[in-house]
Amino acid sequence: MAAKKILNFGAGPAKLPQEVLQKVQRELIDYHGEGISILEMSHRSKTYAGINDGAQQKLRLLLNIPENFKILFLQGGGTGQFASVPLNLIGKTGKADYIVTGNWSRLAAKEAEQYGKVNYVLPETKTFIGPPPKDQWKFTPDASYVYICDNETVYGVEYPEVPDTNGVPLVADMSSNFLTRTIDFSKYGAIFAGAQKNVGPAGVTIVIIREDLLNNALPVCPTVLNYTIMARDNSLHNTPPVFSIYVMDLVFNWIKSQGGLKEMNRRSQVKSGLIYDTMIATKGFYSCPVNKSSRSRINIPFRIVPADVAKQAELEEKFLAGAEDLGMIQLKGHRSVGGIRASLYNAVGVEDVQALADYMTNFYETASK
């Protein structure tokens, strides 16, 4: 009996390309005839040095990263970078601007408050539906940097354009939309991304930082979080997450083979369009709370809004159970907001999202009878 196909809409760790997983499987026991697994290989070996350097070069080509930016492969996830960013960058003036648009930028700002003065650019809110009009933004002229989360996975808020910071270095957490579209590096000082959304398995975090922002770490900055030391040592100061970087390198190959970032962005537009168009077609039965201009292409939270509001929780549970029966997993919304959430990362195919859109339509038609 054939196994049921699983359609993974998880927010992370997320789906990986099938071709990549198959290659990992083939190479796992004996990496390229060396007689040992990549899991057993020294990070000081020539073989791993080739993987490390090759992954950096592939990423530089995919994103067209200028030569005056360093690429680092670090550990600690996005949460580790909430501390690393201020530890490395806030020392210039002791101040930083944080644009809080959701859960992850809010947590990053709270972490940064341990290391300097944090200015909250936007009015405080508990409802994240997109940034307010720009006349409500309040920047600090002498901030060391401005911080954003480019795509908030919990609330589904994504920046449609890069904020203008008036020359202050912009730092962006791109963990959940990294490698889904091109990046204009002239507008950024640093970018970071945990791998477990679009790039590979959990364990490695990519940092891309402009060289002139190095050498500013606070005296209390731990060595393992120090961008300058890690850049000097080519991300090999200590043992890196070898396996995660190896898989990430294969994902870079896959993205290139699929048509690069232009194609990834096209697919993201198609996939998100299928879900948002289904919401429109079902006449408000499904509702996304985010302002249309700030709706994410990658993480789409939504609620079921029946005529009898008292039945919302019951219908959402029924929706999730029915989806799981069809092999559609990890659609439950984040525990802090509830509801339903579809994460449409690069490895999630258009056909997978079409199946979800069809299910949404069928569920609506059945519930409306």
Image: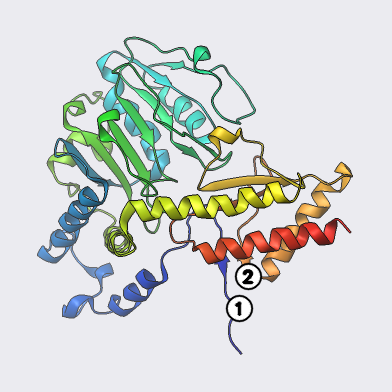
- According to the image, label 1 marks what residue? 4
- Count of number-bearing discs: 2
Q: Residue 155's spot in the image, x, y percent?
A: 59, 38
Measuring 14% from the left and 66% from the top, which residue is drawn there? Answer: 47
Residue type (three-letter) at the residue carrying disc 2 = Gly
Note whether 356 is above or below 280 in the view shown.
below
> Quadrant of the rendered structure where residue 257 is?
bottom left
Image quadrant in which the C terminus is located: bottom right
**Element marked by disc 2:** loop
Query: Residue lying farthest top?
Result: 141
Measuring 70% from the left and 58% from the top, which residue is drawn there? Answer: 360
Measuring 28% from the left and 41% from the top, which residue is drawn there? Answer: 207
Answer with left or right where residue 224 lies relative to residue 97. Answer: left
Note whether 315 is above or below 30 in the view shown.
above
The disc, 1 or 2, on the residue closer to the chain's N-terminal end is 1
- According to the image, label 2 marks what residue? 327
Note whether 320 is above or below 237 in the view shown.
below
Measuring 32% from the left and 14% from the top, which residue is drawn there? Answer: 94
